[in-house]
Image (spheres, rainbow, N blue to C red):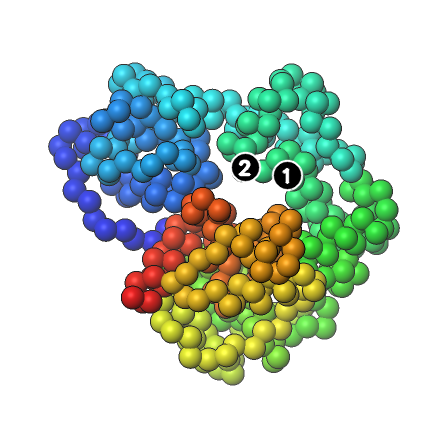
């Protein structure tokens, strides 16, 4: 991670308690704790000296002071030191929950059924519906049917990319009708299945990878405008993601023709005021475009909840559809999906990592004052 937070001093007691955990790892754990990053659940627990309670990183309780926190890699280590599991986030259930969700995901990925029957799935896995639902919420933040839909779409995309025709891919992934697959896949592919199957055929995309305060930033564009803005740590991984999304496009390193677009995006990452109106060349559904345009109206230094965005579109019940449009936004920073948060003010998922989302918001707030 390239994100840095203020340096903290660790007492001698804390250093001894965290023996075996490097300073770098402890800093990373603290960032995940501040971001309530559910992806870190099961990788470590944080114990609070003042309460003698240990929690998982995504615990919704108020964050303790850093000087009161000790990190342990396992709950067993924390309990050996006399810490009790938090009754709110139930960290003692996490390792079992992770294993249960992994088993459920394998079952769902192999299933050709269009609907998920929670009772049947729970019986297959030898557990109860309540336990399964709680495990999904703790580990993924999704309901079982939402994960099943995501896995189905992922398989559908893989079949299209491998050359399968749409009809075969449709029925192999369990969609009962072509209208259902077009309805659901449009929201997540950003285009019709026929267009997606072409994999960007005949498109000419140039890309540049630059340094930024958030690590590497890949900017890809056609002659018409910006098509992708990816954030990450490894240049090779960012390029691979672009090629995976457009396997049949002509993708090459860019010339100097759109370097000013790259400089503009890097400056926005640094928290500076936008100077250029960046043209976009995106394939998207009408609803996605409406959401992305609404996100561009959110002022720097401000945030909106998913429900507020849905209401501003005149569709107050479309909260999940808004969340999906944010998750499928291919041009981070330009379309500022990082400015959308949960109703309770906490940060929700971000494709490029919650710590990056937190730093973007912090920089924009600082620049706005």
Image location (x, y in percent) of residue 268: 40, 69
Please rate how many residues cluster around mark 2, counting C-alpha atoms within 10 Å: few if below 14, some from 14 to 19, many from 20.
Answer: some
Vertical placement of 58 versus 283: above or below? above
347, 258: nearer the viewer? 347
In the image, is 347 to the left or to the right of 51? right
Residue beneath the point at 66% across and 44% down: 150
Residue matched to label 2: 140
Q: Nearer the viewer, residue 211 or 276?
A: 276
Q: Give the residue displayed 69% in from the left and 18% down from the top.
A: 123
Residue at which label 1 appears: 147
Give the Cα distance between marks 2 and 1.
8 Å
Check the image and report above or below for 317 versus 330.
above
On screen, residue 77 above or below 226: above
Crowding around mark 1 (Cα neighbors within 10 Å: few <14, some 14 to 19, many 20+) is many
Q: Which mark is residue 134?
A: none
Mark 2–mark 1 contact, CB under 8 Å? yes
Q: Position of residue 244 (x, y in %)?
A: 62, 57
């Amino acid at each position: 991670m390239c994100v840095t937070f203020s340096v903290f001093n660790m007492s001698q007691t804390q250093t001894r308690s965290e023996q075996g955990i490097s300073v770098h790892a402890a800093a990373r754990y603290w960032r995940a704790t501040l971001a309530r990053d559910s992806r870190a659940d099961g990788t470590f627990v944080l114990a609070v000296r003042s309460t003698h309670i240990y929690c998982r990183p995504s615990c919704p309780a108020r964050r303790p002071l850093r000087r009161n926190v000790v990190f342990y890699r396992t709950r067993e280590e924390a309990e050996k030191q006399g810490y009790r599991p938090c009754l709110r986030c139930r960290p003692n259930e996490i390792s079992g929950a992770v294993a249960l969700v992994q088993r459920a995901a394998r079952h769902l990925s192999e299933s050709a059924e269009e609907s998920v029957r929670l009772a049947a799935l729970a019986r297959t896995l030898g557990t109860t519906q309540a336990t399964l639902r709680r495990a999904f919420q703790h580990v993924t933040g999704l309901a079982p049917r939402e994960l099943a839909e995501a896995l189905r779409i992922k398989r559908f995309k893989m079949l299209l990319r491998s050359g399968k025709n749409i009809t075969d891919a449709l029925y192999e992934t369990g969609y009962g009708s072509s209208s259902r697959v077009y309805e659901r896949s449009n929201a997540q592919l950003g285009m019709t299945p026929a267009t997606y199957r072409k994999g960007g055929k005949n498109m000419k995309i140039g890309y540049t990878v630059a340094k930024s305060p958030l690590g590497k930033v890949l900017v890809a564009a056609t002659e018409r405008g910006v098509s992708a803005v990816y954030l990450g740590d490894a240049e090779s991984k960012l390029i691979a993601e672009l090629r995976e999304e457009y396997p049949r496009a002509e993708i090459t390193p860019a010339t100097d023709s759109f370097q000013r677009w790259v400089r503009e995006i890097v400056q926005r990452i640094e928290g500076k005021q936008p100077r250029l109106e960046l043209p976009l060349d995106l394939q998207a559904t009408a609803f996605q475009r409406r959401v992305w345009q609404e996100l561009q109206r959110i002022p720097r230094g401000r945030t909106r909840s998913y429900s507020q965005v849905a209401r501003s579109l005149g569709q107050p019940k479309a909260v999940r559809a808004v969340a999906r449009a944010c998750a499928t936004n291919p041009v981070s920073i330009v379309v500022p999906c990082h400015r959308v948060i949960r109703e309770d003010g906490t940060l929700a998922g971000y494709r490029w990592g919650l710590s990056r989302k937190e730093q973007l918001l912090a920089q924009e707030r600082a620049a706005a004052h």
